[in-house]
Structure formats: C-alpha cells, structure tokens
Amino acid sequence: MFKKLFKHEKNETVYAHATGQLISLEEVPDPVFNQKMMGEGIAVQPVDGRVVAPADGEIIQIAETKHAFGIRTELGEEILVHIGLETVALKGEGFQVKVALGDKVKRGQTIIEADLAYIAQHASSTVIPMVVTNSAEGQFEFDWQTNLEVKAGETPVFITKIR
C-alpha cells in the first residue's frame, strides 16, 4: 500500500481528515498550499462536511473564523487542517466547531462540521488541505499516499518517522 513502511520505533500513521478523494498538495488551486509554503501535506476533495482529527493529539489552534484547526500529535507533528480555500472571508459562517482549544482528541473524532454547499457557493473551493507546519524543520520523513478514495479517520494517508 505504501511505497515503504518504516520499521523504526518512532513513527506515526496519519489518517484522512475528511471523506472523499485524496489529492496531492500540488493539485490544490492555491499557491500557499501547492508551493508548500506552510509545509508538507496532502488534501481531500470532500464528499461530506465532517472534518476529523487525523491522529491522536491536542488541539493547539482553532481559527477565530472556524475554518481551520491545528493539532499536535503524539510524535510532535503540528498539523494544520484548512477547510476550503478563501474561507476566512466567511467569518465563521458554515462551520460548527465541536472541540475547544487544549482538548485532547482521538483519531477520527469530529473537530469541525462544515456546510459544503454553503462553502461551495461562497468560497473558491471546498478542498481541505492538511499540512505538517513544522515539517520544514527537517525532523520528519514522510511516506505519502495520493489519488485514492479515503474515509475520515479510517484511511491511512501517510506515515511519519522522526529522523
């Protein structure tokens, strides 16, 4: 399934953050994501609005406009999940946050419910990028999956290990 499986003690599987079609960051129509300015990652073109924790961890950020959240995983990855593109302009409309800052969450736990129809009508895209914002520090190695149907919290999308 993955190109290679890491056999080190310090590795972590990160799961799909939404249900839909998994795509590479290069396919996301926004230079902040497709040029990996925020870090390495993956994206989902969602089929429903349930956005979940991709791994066990702690909620370290919830955007005031409810369109994004950050989670720190047990391995130390800081993952940002951004729902849609140009959704900050929606000022929280179309999003219901189900957790609070500092909450410990489990993989697959719903973090945000998004109204995809509303987002599709009022923003440029419903795509949901997920990036490891501290990947530029060079402490992690990734083994990615792309171009497959994924289920939120159930389908592994990459494995990370500490270098």
Image (cartoon, grey):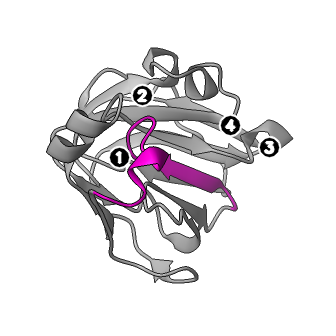
Disc nearest the viewer among 2 and 3: 2
Specify the quadrant of the image occupied by residue 22: top left
| Residue highlighted by disc 3 | 163
Which comes sooner in the sequence, label 1 or label 3? 1
Q: Are marks 1 and 2 in contact (CB under 8 Å)?
A: no
Q: Secondary structure at mark 4?
A: loop
Q: Amino acid at mark 4?
A: Met
Q: Quadrant of the C terminus?
A: top right
Q: Which mark is residue 145?
A: 2
Give the alpha-carbon distance from disc 1 to disc 3, as whole Å: 23 Å
Q: x, y (%) of residue 74? A: 61, 68
| Residue highlighted by disc 1 | 16
Residue at x-position 74% and y-position 48% = 134
Disc nearest the viewer among 4 and 3: 4
Specify the quadrant of the image occupied by residue 141: top right
Segment tinted magenta in the rendering: 76-93
Q: Which mark is residue 161?
A: none
Which comes sooner in the sequence, label 1 or label 4? 1
Which comes sooner in the sequence, label 4 or label 2? 4
Give the alpha-carbon distance from disc 4 to disc 2, as whole Å: 19 Å
Q: Amino acid at mark 2?
A: Gln
